[in-house]
């Protein structure tokens, strides 16, 4: 039996540690599977590198990493499964289209595509001041991460202890691996420039959104699912970072999808 291999891709200026406890929870649902957490150039341990200014460049970045990683040393024989959030989902989309034999299936979370939805839906105007302050302006890291958490999460007020822990952890990541303003801008340019490909992915795709996303309109995911004729599942209360707010919900939706997708995306076939 082949082992299913997953690649997890984060969003704008975030690193693999921002998955928080999602990988551990995911492993409970898929104990036999393997996964790779990826940092794009400019983020995480690679913060000293220059970020790509195109989604295509980010695709080549992850392919280069996979080519040298034992997890995917046989990628050409066994395509990978992808879980991708926000900007990471743009990378997954381009990867599926450009190199279809390398990708078995994808779970795209809280994403948007130029060419399907207007800018005011792809990035809600109410978020612009916070994004500018976080990406481009100096300031106390705890304040920045507090703003970032409010942008991507709807953690309940009774989770105040968890919120404070997350802010402290994220500020620590930023001190250890600071994303430069220039790299933040380069990644923002890559996301803004990315155009929905003319081709549609031939792989099975599950699209997840939250109706309470305060960063990207939930209509973006709905439009994409309708355009591609792909599966769509909606969370009612989570924020933009659904795996952060409700990791179990994400895992359950993936389990259900794997069970009913064409050809059943089990490890024997993929």
Image: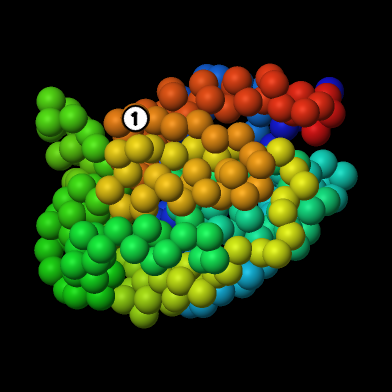
Q: Quadrant of the N terminus?
A: top right
- Taking depth in this image into account, of 196 and 132 the one nearest to the observer is 196
Q: Name above or below for residue 3 compared with residue 46.
A: above
Judge by depth and name the residue closer to the eye, 8 or 217: 217
Task: Tell me if mark 1 has few (under 14), some (14-19) or many (20+) residues whose alpha carbon lies within 10 angstroms of its own.
Answer: few
Residue underneath mark 1: 236
Q: Quadrant of the C terminus?
A: top right
Q: Residue drawn 21% across and 60% down?
A: 126
Up the image or down, 47 lies above or below 107; here it is below
Residue found 12% across the figure and 57% down from its top: 143
Q: Which quarter of the figure has residue 15?
A: bottom left
Structure colour scheme: rainbow
Q: Is residue 168 above or below residue 238?
A: below
At horizontal 60% and vertical 63% (from top left) the residue drawn is 196
Q: Residue at x 23, y 34 (%)?
A: 155
SS type, badge 1: loop
Q: With 261 as the anchor, is 92 left or right in this view?
A: left
Residue projecting furthest to the right: 77
Location of residue 266 in the rendering, given as x and y in whole percent from the top left corner:
75, 24
Q: Where is residue 249? Give x, y as percent.
A: 44, 24
Can residue 62 be seen at all in this image of the molecule?
no
As drawn, which residue projects farthest toward the bottom? 182
Where is residue 211 drawn, in percent x and y? 35, 37
Name the image quarter holding residue 263. Answer: top right
- Answer whether residue 155 is visible to the viewer in this image: yes
Q: Position of residue 27 (x, y in %)?
A: 54, 25
Q: Does residue 114 appear to the left or right of 132 in the view shown?
A: right
């Amino acid at each position: 039996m082949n082992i299913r291999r997953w690649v997890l891709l984060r969003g704008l200026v975030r690193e693999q540690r921002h998955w928080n406890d999602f990988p551990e929870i995911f492993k409970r649902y898929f104990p036999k599977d393997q996964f790779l957490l990826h940092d794009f150039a400019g983020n995480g341990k690679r913060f000293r590198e220059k970020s790509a200014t195109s989604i295509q460049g980010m695709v080549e970045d992850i392919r280069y990493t996979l080519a040298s990683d034992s997890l995917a040393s046989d990628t050409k024989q066994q395509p990978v499964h992808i879980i991708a959030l926000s900007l990471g989902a743009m990378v997954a989309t381009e990867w599926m289209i450009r190199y279809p034999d390398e990708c078995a299936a994808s779970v795209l979370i809280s994403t948007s595509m130029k060419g399907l939805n207007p800018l005011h839906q792809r990035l809600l105007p109410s978020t612009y001041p916070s994004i500018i302050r976080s990406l481009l302006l100096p300031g106390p890291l705890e304040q920045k991460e507090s703003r970032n958490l409010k942008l991507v999460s709807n953690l309940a007020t009774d989770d105040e202890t968890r919120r404070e822990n997350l802010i402290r952890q994220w500020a620590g990541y930023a001190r250890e691996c600071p994303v430069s303003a220039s790299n933040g801008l380069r990644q923002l340019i890559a996301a803004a420039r990315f155009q929905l490909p003319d081709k549609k992915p031939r792989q099975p795709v599950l699209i997840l959104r939250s109706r309470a996303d305060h960063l990207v309109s939930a209509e973006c995911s709905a439009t994409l699912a309708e355009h591609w004729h792909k599966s769509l599942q909606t969370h009612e209360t989570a924020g933009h970072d659904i795996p952060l707010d409700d990791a179990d919900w994400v895992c359950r939706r993936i389990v259900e999808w794997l069970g009913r997708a064409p050809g059943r995306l089990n490890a024997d076939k993929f």
